[in-house]
């Protein structure tokens, strides 16, 4: 491998915050506003001369906070852990993944400018770019096959776009983006490469491979319990600072702020994220191999047959596997629905529900759920078949127990 980065080691090297009274866990700072000891300090905070990030000082000064929407010490601590995980200078935790994505794109683009994006992305992000931005902001998006580098470069040339956007592992087709190659293309065209790493935290570190900004739906794997909505932006200190600017910062002015109580809870889940990711990947790998050997139309980046298997292996950090998601094409939406109903209602294998990264398996027919924002034509272009079932493999039960349930449902569908 050309790179050597371990997110677990990076997070372990980050400063551990003790609680206010010496507790091993950090305290929750629940205040919405913060005091100063000298009146002339407040104007300095408003000018950006004091605070968690101070460009004038060139580093974090600490201890000078203004207002909870701008920054909070507990949220700041969680952001530092996220930055350590991704290997970036800074991180900012938001109230949702889509809030993080929207804020980043609005920070980078102005009315009349454009984005070049992968055509295969989460449906909510697709709707944001295709419908909401043109209608509300005048920002246009051209969607491309992210694996076709000539098409990507041509789109950047023709549009003069400020942003190239992709997902490390595409939702739901599991197409893998070549981040080093896309970074080189973006730099040649003066564009910022923004990568959604929701499907592959710990597994791939996009900033180490050339991405300028990394975004997450923390709701998914990082949370791991499907109990909170949260997001993140990881980037340079200068970019995060620009997003917090009192006059022009998208994070400050749009207000997608994470609640400090949520930040505190998520901070306690970060130390075992690597263990969870490795086990999700291990189980998905086993199920994918067995389904492949049975002749099923399974897609999983850990299979040598996957078109970008070698690419993902070359980008992956060792020890975390190649992801906890697989897809299975059952041929029709009717067969897909029956398959999921057997697994949930007869076997308690998992739940028919959107989202991913939960400790239980979650299953959805992507074309009629998380990718329903795309038209039928757009789904075909993105490679989303009507009977495609996306499965986020969980951690509960034994592997043989869960495999027996999965195999029974698949066998019955094939015989029907």
Image (cartoon, rainbow, N blue to C red):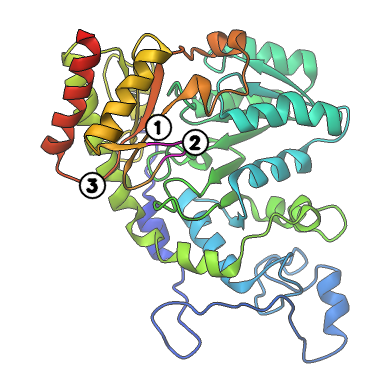
Is there a contact, CB below 8 Å, between mark 3 and mark 1? no
List the residue tagged with mark 2.
209
Q: Quadrant of residue 406?
A: top left
Q: How many badges with numbers are in the image?
A: 3
User: At 54% from the left edge and 45% from the top edge, which residue is drawn?
Assistant: 217
Q: Does residue 262 lie above or below 30 as drawn?
A: above
Question: Dot 1: what SS?
Answer: helix
Is there a contact, CB below 8 Å, between mark 2 and mark 1? yes
- The magenta-colored residue range is 352-356
Residue 181 disc label: none
Question: Dot 2: what SS?
Answer: helix
Chief secondary structure of the magenta span? loop
Of the two numbered discs 2 and 1 on the same chain, state the one appearing first in sequence. Answer: 2
Count neighbours of disc 1 (C-alpha within 10 A) and say few if under 14, some if 14 to 19, many if 20 or more.
many
From the viewer's perspective, is 149 left or right of 300? right
- Tell me the CA gap for discs 3 and 1: 29 Å
Q: Is residue 359 visible?
A: yes
List the residue tagged with mark 1.
315
Percent x, y of residue 238: 71, 54
Q: Quadrant of the C terminus?
A: top left
Residue 396 disc label: 3
Q: Is residue 176 magenta?
A: no
User: At 73% from the left edge and 67% from the top edge, which residue is drawn?
Assistant: 54
Q: Is residue 115 visible?
A: no
Count neighbours of disc 3 (C-alpha within 10 A) and say few if under 14, some if 14 to 19, many if 20 or more.
some
* Residue closest to the far left: 400
Q: Does residue 263 lie above or below 126 as drawn?
A: below
- Tell me the CA gap for discs 2 and 1: 8 Å
Percent x, y of residue 333: 42, 14
Percent x, y of residue 399: 15, 38
Of the two numbered discs 3 and 1 on the same chain, state the one appearing first in sequence. Answer: 1
């Amino acid at each position: 491998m050309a790179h050597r980065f371990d997110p677990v080691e990076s997070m372990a090297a980050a400063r551990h915050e003790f609680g206010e009274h010496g507790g091993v866990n950090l305290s929750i700072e629940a205040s919405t506003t913060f005091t100063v000891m000298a009146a002339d300090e407040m104007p300095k905070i408003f000018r950006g001369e004091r605070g968690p990030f101070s460009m004038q000082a060139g580093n974090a000064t600490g201890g000078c906070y203004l207002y909870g929407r701008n920054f909070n010490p507990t949220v700041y601590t969680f952001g530092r852990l996220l930055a350590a995980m991704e290997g970036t200078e800074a991180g900012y935790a938001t109230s949702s993944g889509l809030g993080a994505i929207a804020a980043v794109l609005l920070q980078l683009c102005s009315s009349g400018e454009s984005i070049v994006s992968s055509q295969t992305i989460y449906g909510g992000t697709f709707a944001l770019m295709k419908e909401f931005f043109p209608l509300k902001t005048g920002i246009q998006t051209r969607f491309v096959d992210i694996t076709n580098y000539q098409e990507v470069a041509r789109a950047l040339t023709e549009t003069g776009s400020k942003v190239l956007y992709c997902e490390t592992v595409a939702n739901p087709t599991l197409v893998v983006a070549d981040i080093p190659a896309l970074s080189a293309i973006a730099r040649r065209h003066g564009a910022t490469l923004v990568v959604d790493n929701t499907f592959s935290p710990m597994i791939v570190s996009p900033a180490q491979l050339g991405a300028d900004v990394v975004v997450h739906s923390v709701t998914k794997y990082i949370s791991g319990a499907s109990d909170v909505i949260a997001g993140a932006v990881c980037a340079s200190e200068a970019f995060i600072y620009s997003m917090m600017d009192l006059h022009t910062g998208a994070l400050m002015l749009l207000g997608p702020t994470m609640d400090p109580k949520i930040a505190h809870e998520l901070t306690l889940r970060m130390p075992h994220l690597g263990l969870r990711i490795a086990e999700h990947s291990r189980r998905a790998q086993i199920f994918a191999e067995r389904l492949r050997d049975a002749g099923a139309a399974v897609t999983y980046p850990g299979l040598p047959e996957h078109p970008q298997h070698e690419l993902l292996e070359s980008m992956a950090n060792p020890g975390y596997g190649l992801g906890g998601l697989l897809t299975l094409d059952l041929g029709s939406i009717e067969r897909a629905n029956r398959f999921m109903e057997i697994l949930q209602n007869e076997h308690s294998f998992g739940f028919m529900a959107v989202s991913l990264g939960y400790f239980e398996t979650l299953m959805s027919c992507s074309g009629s759920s998380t990718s329903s924002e795309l038209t039928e034509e757009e789904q075909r272009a993105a490679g989303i078949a009507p009977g495609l079932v996306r499965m986020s493999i969980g951690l509960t039960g034994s592997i043989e127990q869960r495999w027996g349930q999965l195999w029974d449902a698949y066998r019955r569908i094939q015989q029907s």
